[in-house]
Image: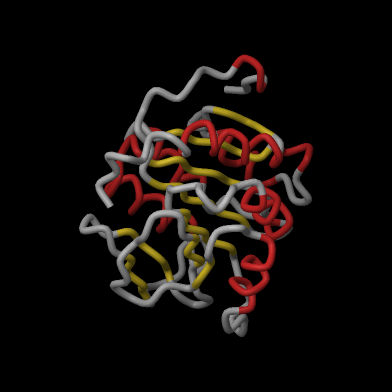
């Protein structure tokens, strides 16, 4: 469902975390979103970007230069902290556990990808339910579409980058085509929406 920025309903659900996914062309979109979040943004943000197998932490380092929140690749079983950005390491699926920790997995590729956006999103739906905000940005595959359906079914808020503004529109369009996307926005508006929905509802967060 496409919603004009001025007509979006206010957030009435306590949000607990943000999950984001991107692939080809995703880095500029993700940096634009994260650069719009102030250091006092309190929700944790978990990011899957399809990476070259030899990335060796470079994506997290580059993202950290743009973000005003701390950014790191997590270790297995690391506890999720508020106001922190976690990026999935190359060659590992990143999942959310119900005890508030991150799990890293070497299980088979999903949609030819490891890390997979679907894997993160589906685990976040199980762990946080309606408390999740999920975002899909530029990419050339349909990874994340299935995960968006899971988060929508759990009551979470689902947002896709406006395909016309994406370097590679296929990924956000695939998510939109599932019917599971609540809002379609340019990246600058996505950052503002996160502040609206996540900046003031975290005091009772279960993390």
Spot occupied by residue 157 in the image (x, y as percentages of width and height):
45, 33
Check the picture and name the quadrant holding the N terminus: top right
Spot occupied by residue 197 in the image (x, y as percentages of width and height):
48, 33
Q: Residue at x 63, y 72 (%)?
A: 59
Q: Is residue 3 left or right of residue 99?
A: right
Q: 79 above or below 152? A: below
Q: Residue at x 26, y 59 (%)?
A: 97
Q: Is residue 46 left or right of residue 192?
A: left
Count of picture labels:
0
Q: 57 above or below 38? A: below
Q: Is residue 36 left or right of residue 124?
A: right
Q: Quadrant of residue 53?
A: bottom right
Residue situated in front as seen by the camera: 160 or 71: 71
Spot occupied by residue 178 in the image (x, y as percentages of width and height):
52, 34
Q: Quadrant of residue 75?
A: bottom left
Q: Which color mode does the image show?
A: secondary structure
Q: Residue furthest left?
A: 99
Q: Residue furthest front?
A: 40
Q: Residue at x 48, y 73 (%)?
A: 73
Q: 37 above or below 108? A: above
Q: Residue furthest top?
A: 7
Q: Residue at x 39, y 41 (%)?
A: 132
Spot occupied by residue 95 in the image (x, y as percentages of width and height):
36, 62
Q: 189 above or below 1? A: below
């Amino acid at each position: 469902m496409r919603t004009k920025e001025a007509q979006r309903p206010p957030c009435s659900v306590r949000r607990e975390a943000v999950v984001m996914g991107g692939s080809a062309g995703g880095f500029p979109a993700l940096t634009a979103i994260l650069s719009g979040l102030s250091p006092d943004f309190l929700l944790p943000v978990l990011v899957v970007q399809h990476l070259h197998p030899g990335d060796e932490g470079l994506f997290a380092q580059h993202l950290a230069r743009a973000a005003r929140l701390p950014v790191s690749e997590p270790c297995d079983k690391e506890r999720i902290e508020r106001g922190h950005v976690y990026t999935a390491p190359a060659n590992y699926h990143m999942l959310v556990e119900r005890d508030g920790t991150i799990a890293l997995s070497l299980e088979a590729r999903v949609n030819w990808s490891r890390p997979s956006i679907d894997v993160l999103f589906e685990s976040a739906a199980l762990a946080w339910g309606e408390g999740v905000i999920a975002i899909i940005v530029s990419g050339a595959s349909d990874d994340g579409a299935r995960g968006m359906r899971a988060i929508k079914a759990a009551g979470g808020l689902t947002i896709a980058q406006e395909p016309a503004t994406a370097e590679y529109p296929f990924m956000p369009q695939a998510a939109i085509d599932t019917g599971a996307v609540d809002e379609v926005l340019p990246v600058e508006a996505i950052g503002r929406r996160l502040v609206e929905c996540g900046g003031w509802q975290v005091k009772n967060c279960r993390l």
